[in-house]
Amino acid sequence: RLGWPGVIEAYRAFLPVGPRTPVVTLLEGGTPLLEAPKLSARVGARVLLKLEGMNPTGSFKDRGMTMAITKALEAGAKAVVCASTGNTSASAAAYAARAGLRAAVLIPEGHIALGKLAQALVHGARVLQVRGNFDEALRIVRELGERAPVTVVNSVNPDRLEGQKTGAFEIVDELGDAPDLHCLPVGNAGNITAYWRGYLEYREAGRVTRLPRMLGFQAKGAAPIVEGRVVERPETIATAIRIGNPASWRGAEAAAAESGGAIAAVSDEEILDAYRFLAVEESVFCEAASAAAVAGLLRSEVPRGATVVCVLTGHGLKDPDLAISQIQVPDAVEPTFGAVTEALGL
Ligand code: F0G
């Protein structure tokens, strides 16, 4: 949007920054809240989609990363490190490059979407593929944070959640109050924790008259919070949320409990149904993990006429392999008028 200053300048009063803090921004945030008419008709409520794929690196992670990199720079850090299922690494790579910091990212070998891997590499991060899953990579990164001269920019870094809570501010600023229901995918559980904090802080500030019920959705094969136990070998087509031991587990539980919401699981099949529905009926191309929010909404009890916000956390172009697996790539035709009209049945 014209003149949008990025989330730190937009919400400075709510963030741990001072007048001399060196703000590192790519003008993240200010993302569209799009009406979803077909989805609204299907669930009998007003459903809006928060398009976080419109952020500079194509996911919501940029909200937290502008804060984490800004604070790292302020503290004199030279290098940052993270474990990631892909989006955090893409965002860390971009913001670190902007700040002139070195970035190292640890990703689970063979289980990150191609677009995200490409981003981390083109922005010049040192990318290490780990022969293990996200949880194992994060364990090593936490240890690096304690024993090596690097700043961890995973959401275990409190500055990340500070930045991410601005998503809630934007929703309220646009709607004039909090929605009735807030749906989002849950992986490492930082985002649901941050959104809930955002709504609570806006209540403190007298900007809302009510709070939403927070509905968080994990993928069935990677649903530790739902099952109440660590999942050693998480599996789901939604690689972004292929996490078995979320760092903000408690935060997610608190958000669900305090808001009268829930954490529930959706199958890969439901996720893909929602992914295709969003693309075909709402013209929104999001990644599979994001579609989990809508898959979850579709299996939830929704009061008639309620206002519902689903956060679509990342852009569909992040994962071209998944997209192509969901459609049929057409055969080529001869470069003639006749061949084209015949192929189109005209
Ligand atoms: N949606 C997308 C597209 C994500 O990339 C993630 C997390 C989530 C949802 C879940 O958010 O972790 O705050 O509960 N991705 C992290 C990463 C883990 O490394 O990019 P969460």
Image: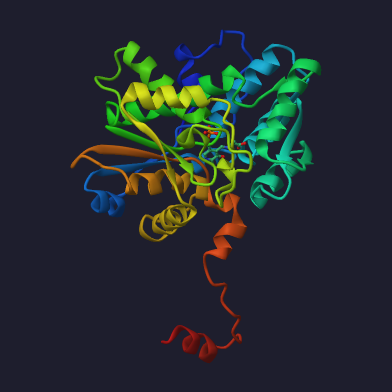
- How many marks the image carries: the answer is 0
- Please identify the residue farthest to the left as the structure is shown: 304
Q: On the rendered image, what quadrant is the C terminus found in? A: bottom left
Q: Residue at x 24, y 52 (%)?
A: 41
Q: On the rendered image, what quadrant is the N terminus found in? A: top left
Relative vertical location of residue 323 with respect to residue 291 in this rendering, above or below: below
Relative vertical location of residue 345 with respect to residue 73 in this rendering, above or below: below
Of residue 258 and residue 176, the one placed in the foreground of this image is 258
Relative vertical location of residue 63 with respect to residue 111 in this rendering, above or below: above
| Percent position of residue 168, x then y | 40, 27
Q: Residue at x 66, y 37 (%)?
A: 134
Q: Residue at x 59, y 37 (%)?
A: 244
Identify the colour scheme used. Answer: rainbow
| Percent position of residue 80, x then y | 73, 25
Q: Is residue 30 left or right of residue 138?
A: left
Please indicate, yes or no, whether residue 27 appears anywhere in the rendered image. Answer: no
Relative vertical location of residue 75 with respect to residue 84 in this rendering, above or below: above
- Please identify the residue farthest to the bottom as the structure is shown: 338
| Percent position of residue 154, x then y | 63, 27
Q: Is residue 207 left or right of residue 346?
A: left
- Please identify the residue farthest to the top as the structure is shown: 19
Q: Quadrant of ligand 1?
A: top right
Please indicate, yes or no, whether residue 245 appears anywhere in the rendered image. Answer: yes
Q: Residue at x 67, y 48 (%)?
A: 111
Q: Is residue 65 left or right of residue 346?
A: right
